[in-house]
Image (cartoon, grey):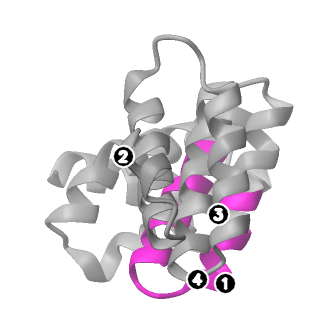
Amino acid sequence: LENLAAILQRESSQDPPTLESSVNALRAVLALDSVLSSRGPFGVHLAWLDAALSAAEKADAPVALTAEAYEARGRARRVRGRTHEALADLGKARSLAATAKAPGLEARALAQIGNALYQQGKLDDAMLCLEEGVRIVPVGDRATEGLLLSFRGFVAMDSHRFAEAEAF
């Protein structure tokens, strides 16, 4: 954890950021994301994502890698109740993933958008996002497919479409 944090801090603080430093910062923050999301330190999670994304934007980092970081920041903001900002990040992640022709990443972004809309009580909009994600998820991407289907089940259940919910 400490080594990745040091890499992230060093690479995201280069002024001006280079393509190499921005890629290194993005890779470090994405490697740390699952730990930061579940175990912390929670206080630095968003700040580190912000720093890596700032470097990525300035250095024109690879689109798919940048999209992954926006998706991670969108998830982090969503769980902190910052839904409006989360939806903006997740929308940007989806758009960048589409530009990069990365359907698995686009489907993950749609899963998170659907989940955020579900949490806002926008069940019809949530279901539309989740259904689109199921349509584009690559064959064999079982993790994303499972996420999309489980979220669809929650939305169907809360929409009182119990027969449909049972299918998920």
Nearest the eye: 126 or 92: 126
List the single residue furthest toward the right.
99
Separation of disc 1 and disc 2 at Cα? 31 Å
Circle 4: residue type: Gly
Magenta range? 67-91
Mark drawn on residue 84: 1
Mark drawn on residue 121: 4
Circle 3: residue type: Ala
Residue hosting label 2: 166
Is residue 140 in the magenta section? no
Residue 12 higher or lower than 48, as above or below: above
Q: Earlier in the sequence, mark 4 or mark 1?
A: 1
Q: Is mark 3 on a helix, strand or loop?
A: helix
Q: Can residue 140 be seen in this view?
A: yes
Residues marked 1 and 3 touching at CB (< 8 Å)? no
Circle 2: residue type: Glu
Residue 40 higher or lower than 32, as above or below: below
Residues marked 4 and 3 touching at CB (< 8 Å)? no
The percent position of residue 134, horizontal first and vertical second, equals: 61, 33
Q: Which residue is drawn at 54% across and 86% down?
A: 82
